[in-house]
Image (spheres, rainbow, N blue to C red):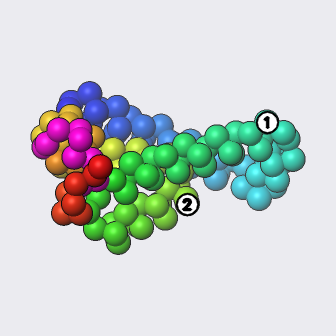
Amino acid sequence: MTFLRVFSILGVVVMGSAVVLGLMAGGFGEEGAAIWALLWGKVTLVDLYLGLLFFGLWVAMRETRPLVTLLWWVGLITLGNLAAALYLVVVSFTSSTINEALTGNGSSPEGIGSRERGAVS
């Protein structure tokens, strides 16, 4: 769990620093339009949002409260991987084992998404 804590906190620091630097040094609208104009800019954004969708699905499987899931999804859409790193920080400090961190409970991986919702088949 120490590795997950250190890794996720480092992710928050790196992403937070990159976002602050980007906001201070560049124009989001102008530079975003330049990136979108490039084919690899579009590929990178598709890659980013598919990755965030997959991460968001994992969050939805872990969380038992729909409002909490929705708030994390809004964070992922607006903050990108900064929100993902923040979620991992929260998970690392609220879980006592790696299995609990992955599944949201202390049971086997078969139980992913099954807490208080019935078994997953």
Q: Position of residue 29 (x, y in %)?
A: 77, 59
Q: Residue at x 28, y 33 (%)?
A: 4
Q: Residue at x 64, y 47 (%)?
A: 22
User: The disc labelled 1 sits on which kind of residue?
Assistant: Trp
Q: Which secondary structure lies at badge 2?
A: helix
The answer to whether residue 107 is magenta is yes
User: The disc labelled 2 sits on which kind of residue?
Assistant: Thr
Q: How many marks?
A: 2
Marks 1 and 2, the one that precedes in the sequence: 1
**Quarter of the view holding residue 96:** top left
Q: Which residues are magenta?
A: 106-114
**Quarter of the view holding residue 1:** top left
Give the answer, above or below, for where 69 lies relative to 106. below
Q: Residue at x 77, y 44 (%)?
A: 42
Q: Which secondary structure lies at badge 1?
A: helix
The answer to whether residue 37 is magenta is no
Labels 1 and 2 touching (C-beta < 8 A): no
- Mark 1 crowdedness (10 Å alpha carbons): few <14, some 14-19, many ≥20: few
Q: CA distance from mark 1 to mark 2?
A: 21 Å
- In the picture of the structure, the residue carrying the numbered disc 2 is 78
Q: Position of residue 17 (x, y in %)?
A: 51, 42
Q: Is residue 4 left or right of residue 75?
A: left
Q: Nearer the viewer, residue 48 or 3?
A: 48
Residue 42 appears anywhere in the view: yes
Circle 1 or circle 2, nearest the eye: 1
Q: Nearer the viewer, residue 18 or 92?
A: 92
Q: Nearer the viewer, residue 84 or 30?
A: 84
Q: Nearer the viewer, residue 7 or 91?
A: 91
Find residue 40 and name its label. 1
Q: Position of residue 91 (x, y in %)?
A: 26, 47
